[in-house]
Amino acid sequence: MNIGLLVSEPEDEIVKKICMGAVKAANDKEVTLVIMPGKKLCSKKGTAKDDDFDYQYNALFDYAKQISFDVILVDIERIGKNVTILRKEAFLNKFKDIPLLTLSEQEGYTCVNQVENEKEHFEQLGYEAVCDAIFYVKNQVLPPAEPNQKFEFNPEPDYKALINIAEIGRKILHRKYESEASYKVVTNIALENGLKDCGIFLYDKKVKNNEKNTWKIPEKIGVKAAIINGKEALFDDGKLETETSEIISLFTRDSNKVLIMGNLFVGDCQLGAMIVDFHKKFLIDNFFDSITGILTGISRLSYLERQLQETREELYDVQEELARDDSVLDHIGDQDYLTGGLNRRGFFAKAYDLLKENFNEGKTAIVAYINMESLKNINDIYGHEEGDRVVKKVADILQKVFDDCIIGRIRGDEFAVIEITDDEDRSEALREEMSVQNTKLFSESKRYINHLQYSICEFSYEENLSLRQMLKETDESLQRIKGNI
């Protein structure tokens, strides 16, 4: 049986006691328990007073909806300490499809048996909650209260926790690793500290989570490193991703575990999650947050290095295209010397500004490549003067078709176009108009064939979608068209 325990923060002395009681019960009853410390609920996401990014920590609770828990326990008194009753109810209603018990009275919801153990009240409450959850799932009613238990919790001294944090930081943050290798260092450290289960999971792209963009958990998540039952996890065919809803079951297929889960985020973006064997040192103030903070740091570095590599590739592409450009004049200024419109440099400058200012949620970028496939033959047979006239003619046609778009002659025989729109039919209308104009151009030429090959692609907004990626896909589409004609 899998039980989720939603609590606020390990720094709370009451939460520590509840967790220790719940852990004892999970071990005694041989069930899986996942502790999810998601901080206190915020009355409103992303407000200036949320300096601790509590609304980002709250995202950890969203995983509880996705993971296949048999029952969820919620310490609503401490999670909802700073919000209204209606806000608490709205939070609990998110789990309406999952059996749920609260640790304190909340009108409209089933509460676990309250305990009378004054000396170890909250430890007994945590123990009682897990025992009640097991019985409730099987019988849909609460059992008689559990007898009082004896609890032994001898927390490690804080200085030992600080030594652990310093050691992890030294091994990870001061070295340069090959791609993804730093994550395996983390799982190796977990092994060295006696933990048999540890997993680091990251999304391929950062996921926005703020007042305007409430996040939706992606269906898939990447497995950066994982040890299960003390061994490095191996996946079929080297597959390094899994269903996000299955990240707990990866560890619990063969045996019951007590795990703790933390989410990784930076700013208002969710990056992924960490899951690890529960250890009493995780209840030391700020220890678990420090671990997830270090992981967030190396995750952030990984994202930045990937973006840097993409930027390098884009610069290499620009350098290559400049070297292939047949007009030295096009390297100076923004204007194409022949058509009077934008040259390559001008097009890219305008395109980048357009994307930065106007490409956002709900908008679509339309990118087109137009190739004058006959220009070389015209130049060879009829001379460059005739070729220049044809280029000007094509530029005039494109100006009519792509009115209000950014158009540039990026090579001697090739034009590029970009537009940002919210018109769903815009790209199809442009294709139809290009077909009409292309037919006219073809029929007007008496001495030679003057025909355009073109590709018009559309791209929905994504935070990490670059101009280079859009141009690359459009160019590949054009090459496929050329190959089929």
Image: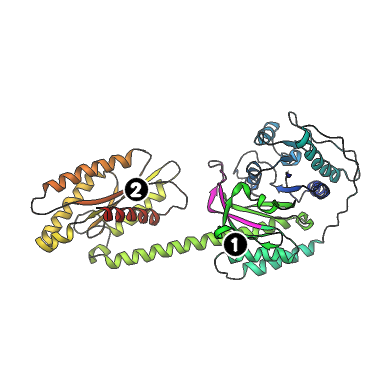
Given this view, does label 1 or label 2 mark the residue nearer the observer?
2
Q: Is residue 253 left or right of residue 315?
A: right
The residue sitting at the left extreme is 447
Write the residue at 53% across / 42% down: 213
SS for callout 1: helix
Residues at circles 1 and 2 in contact by the CB criterion of under 8 Å: no
Q: Position of residue 250 (x, y in %)?
A: 66, 53
What residue is pinned by disc 1? Answer: 298
Where, by quadrant of the figure, is residue 43 drawn? top right
State yes or no: residue 207 in magenta.
Answer: yes
Front residue (pair 357, 237): 237
Q: Which mark is residue 457?
A: 2
> Could you tell me which residue is drawn at 56 percent across and 46 percent down?
219
Residue 30 shown left or right of residue 198 in the figure: right
Which image quarter is the N terminus in?
Answer: top right
In this rendering, does residue 356 appear at all?
Answer: yes
User: In the rendered view, does 136 fall on the left or right side of 400?
Assistant: right
In this picture, which residue range is highlighted in magenta?
199-222
Q: Which residue is located at x 53 percent, y 41 percent?
A: 212
Other residues around mark 1 within 10 Å, as few (<14) / some (14–19) / many (≥20): some
Residue with the most extreme bottom position: 175
User: Label 1 sits on what residue type?
Assistant: Ile
Give percent across and percent down for residue 396.
19, 48
- Residue at the far top: name it: 108
Across and down, in percent, residue 232 comes to: 65, 63
Label 2: which secondary element: strand
Number of marks in the image? 2
Amino acid of disc 2? Cys
